Amino acid sequence: MFRWLIVTFLALLLINGLSPLLGKLGFGKLPGDFRFRLFGREWFIPLTTTLLLSLAAAGIARLL
């Protein structure tokens, strides 16, 4: 259980660190990435970006 917590934390750190780079590449601005304002807060749901990144990760894992 503790190992999964560490892996999840490291993955979130990696994603947080790479998010400016991914934003420059156009991720987060794809059709299907929703950004809206509700109750005075801005919400962002990156459906298409998530799908593309998971397909890329699955492809890399399959090659290894």
Image (cartoon, rainbow, N blue to C red):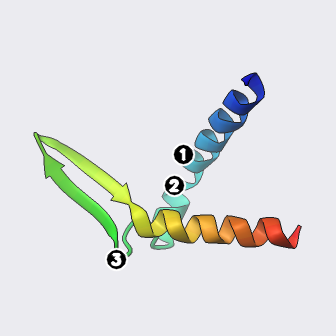
SS category of the residue bearing label 3: loop
Closer-to-camera residue (3/40):
3
Q: Percent position (x, y) of residue 13?
A: 61, 40
Left or right of 5 in this view: 52: left
Asked where in the image residue 4 lies, by quadrant, the reply is: top right
Left or right of 31 in this view: 61: right
Quarter placement of the N terminus: top right
Q: CA distance from mark 3 to mark 1?
A: 21 Å
Q: CA distance from mark 3 to mark 2?
A: 18 Å
Amino acid type, label 2 = Ser
Quarter placement of the C terminus: bottom right
Q: Percent position (x, y) of residue 44?
A: 31, 53
The residue wearing badge 3 is 31
Q: Which callout, 3 or 1, points at the residue further toward the start of the chain?
A: 1
Amino acid type, label 1 = Asn
Closer-to-camera residue (44/63):
63
Q: Percent position (x, y) of residue 15?
A: 58, 49
Crowd around label 1: few <14 · some 14–19 · many ≥20 (10 Å): few
Q: Residue at x 64, y 46 (%)?
A: 14
In the depicted structure, whether residue 35 falls above or below residue 11: below
SS category of the residue bearing label 2: helix
Q: Residue at x 54, y 61 (%)?
A: 21
Q: Residue at x 34, y 77 (%)?
A: 31
The residue wearing badge 1 is 16
Amino acid type, label 3 = Pro
Asked if disc 2 and disc 1 are in contact, CB closer than 8 Å, the reply is: yes
Q: Percent position (x, y) of residue 56?
A: 66, 71
The residue wearing badge 2 is 19
Left or right of 27 in this view: 56: right
